[in-house]
């Protein structure tokens, strides 16, 4: 992928402009891996629809002359109510990979969540500055799992995020049809399995699904999270919660936050849209743990909607990698600026000086 900066043509005005540019630049099997969802992609589409159906009721005459979207996330402060979602293998999209994304996130003053399947090591990312969180896929080997947690702590990650919605990988038909496998120079460098893994072997279907099956714990339970709670002092976030009962369970077991998420429509196709599940989860557990949202956030208006529905903040996935593919670090900076500027503008138009005011906005769901 050429390390081309977003200079050609008109400046992108929306995340969708960046997506179009990235899609033009990427080989089809990579843009499919990035954009795709599971099954018939019903949930992928539902995520967008549910956000579009949230209508926010603006306030007027507040006297506010500026909007400050600064947020407290997991006990830290972030310039925006937003973190970069954990995503595997950034080096597929640009040679500078996670390093470029971590630097852009640091410059924007938002946390970067390092995936277990990062193609850059935890230790190397420690040099990028800014706030880093570590996303944990619980591995079949408990020793290797706790070693990863230890390395995350030692390399300065401030929060652990355990992904709970991948007992197996969702059936992503685009990847199956493309027989998608990793190129030899991109790998999960933080895992013990050496230079090659089943993720590199084009087989009958998606090599990544085969790798997930081989590497990840297939039967994670709350007991695992309780063990993790006993072993680390870092805040723990559980990612992939859609039922209020699971959010209550997380709070009862000492978890600090949940991410309401269907993995961007990449796991259970037919799962409820994340934004539709959010209000029930805020009502069930919002007083005991922070509630974040991901899956479908594409604009500052979407962030406003999520916060108005009660989220403390959002994770942003695909838009960041579209930015990376289109323009490296500068492309990610551009995407984070579009989201931040869009949120500030939306707050101004809704009469909100800060996120506390956004949280007071009324919302209605239109169909
Ligand atoms: C290419 C790609 C790789 C991903 N890898 C991971 C991962 O390693 N760990 C994880 O917890 N979630 C992973 N996710 C899910 C994201 O963290 C997030 O839940 C989702 O992308 C949010 O939806 P959005 O892309 O619509 O913003 C991945 C998503 C994409 C698109």
Image: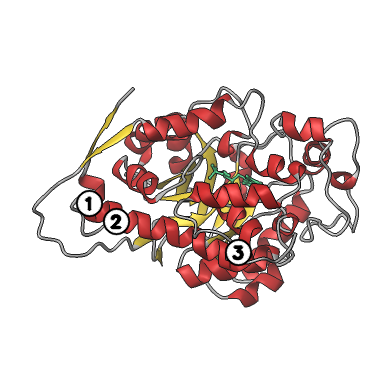
Residue 179 at x, y percent in the picture? 84, 35
Q: What element carries label 1?
A: helix
How is this picture coloured? secondary structure
Measuring from the top left, give residue 106's x and y in whole percent: 52, 70
Q: How many marks?
A: 3
1 or 3: tag closer to the N-terminus: 3
**Badges 1 and 2: C-beta atoms under 8 Å apart?**
yes
Which one is closest to the eye, mark 1 or mark 3? 1
Give the SS element for disc 2.
helix
The verdict on label 2 being within 8 Å of ligand 1 is: no
Residue 247 to residue 146: above or below: above
> Residue 345 bears which disc, if any?
2
Compare marks 3 and 2 and give the one earlier in the sequence.
3
Q: Is residue 46 left or right of residue 189?
A: left
Horizontal relation, residue 47 to residue 120: left or right: left
Q: Which residue is drawn at 77% across and 54% down?
A: 143
- Residue 277: image quadrant is top left
Identify the image quadrant of residue 343.
bottom left
Asked which secondary structure carries label 3, the reply is helix
Q: Cα distance, mark 1 to mark 3?
A: 30 Å
For label 2, the crowd category at 10 Å Cα-Cα, with few meaning under 14, some 14 to 19 and many 20 or more, is some
| Residue identifier under label 1 | 349
> What is the quadrant of the C terminus in the image?
top left
Whether residue 266 can be seen here: yes
User: Residue at 71% of width from left, 34% of height from top?
Assistant: 169
> Residue 165 placed where, x, y %?
61, 36
Q: Where is residue 85 in the image (x, y as percent from the top left)?
A: 56, 52
How much space separates mark 1 and mark 2, taking CA atoms? 6 Å
Q: Which residue is disc 3 drawn over?
A: 101
Using residue 85 as the reference point, say whether residue 172 is left or right of it: right
Mark 3, other Cα within 10 Å: few <14 / some 14–19 / many ≥20: many
Q: In which quarter of the image is ligand 1?
A: top right
């Amino acid at each position: 992928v050429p390390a081309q900066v977003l200079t050609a043509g008109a400046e992108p005005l929306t995340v969708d402009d960046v997506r179009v540019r990235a899609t033009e630049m990427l080989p089809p099997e990579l843009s499919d891996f990035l954009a795709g969802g599971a099954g018939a992609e019903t949930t992928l589409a539902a995520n967008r629809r549910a956000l579009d159906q949230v209508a926010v009721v603006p306030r007027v005459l507040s006297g506010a002359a500026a909007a400050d979207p600064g947020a407290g996330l997991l006990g830290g402060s972030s310039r925006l109510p937003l973190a970069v979602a954990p995503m595997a293998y950034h080096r597929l999209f640009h040679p500078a990979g996670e390093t470029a994304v971590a630097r852009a996130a640091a410059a924007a003053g938002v946390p970067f969540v390092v995936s277990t399947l990062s193609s850059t090591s935890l230790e190397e990312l420690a040099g990028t500055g800014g706030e880093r969180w570590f996303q944990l896929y619980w591995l079949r080997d408990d020793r290797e799992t706790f070693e990863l947690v230890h390395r995350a702590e030692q390399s300065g990650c401030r929060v652990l995020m355990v992904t709970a919605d991948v007992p197996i990988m969702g059936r992503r038909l685009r990847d199956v049809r493309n027989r998608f496998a990793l190129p030899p120079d991109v790998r999960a460098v933080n895992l013990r399995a050496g230079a090659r893994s089943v993720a590199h072997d084009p087989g009958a279907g998606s090599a990544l699904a085969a790798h997930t099956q081989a590497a990840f714990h297939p039967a994670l339970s709350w007991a695992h999270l309780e063990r993790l709670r006993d072993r680390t002092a870092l805040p723990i976030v559980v990612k992939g919660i859609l039922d209020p009962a699971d959010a209550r369970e997380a709070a009862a077991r000492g978890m600090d936050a949940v991410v309401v998420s269907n993995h961007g429509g990449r796991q259970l196709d037919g799962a409820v849209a994340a934004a539709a599940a959010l209000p029930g989860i805020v009502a069930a557990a919002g007083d005991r743990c922070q509630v974040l949202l991901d899956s479908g956030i594409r604009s500052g208006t979407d962030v406003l909607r999520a916060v108005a529905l009660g989220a403390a903040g959002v994770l942003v996935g695909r838009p960041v990698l579209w930015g990376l593919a289109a323009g490296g670090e500068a492309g990610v900076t551009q995407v984070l600026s579009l989201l931040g500027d869009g949120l500030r503008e939306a707050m101004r138009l809704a009469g909100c000086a800060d996120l506390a005011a956004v949280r007071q906005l009324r919302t209605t769901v239109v169909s």
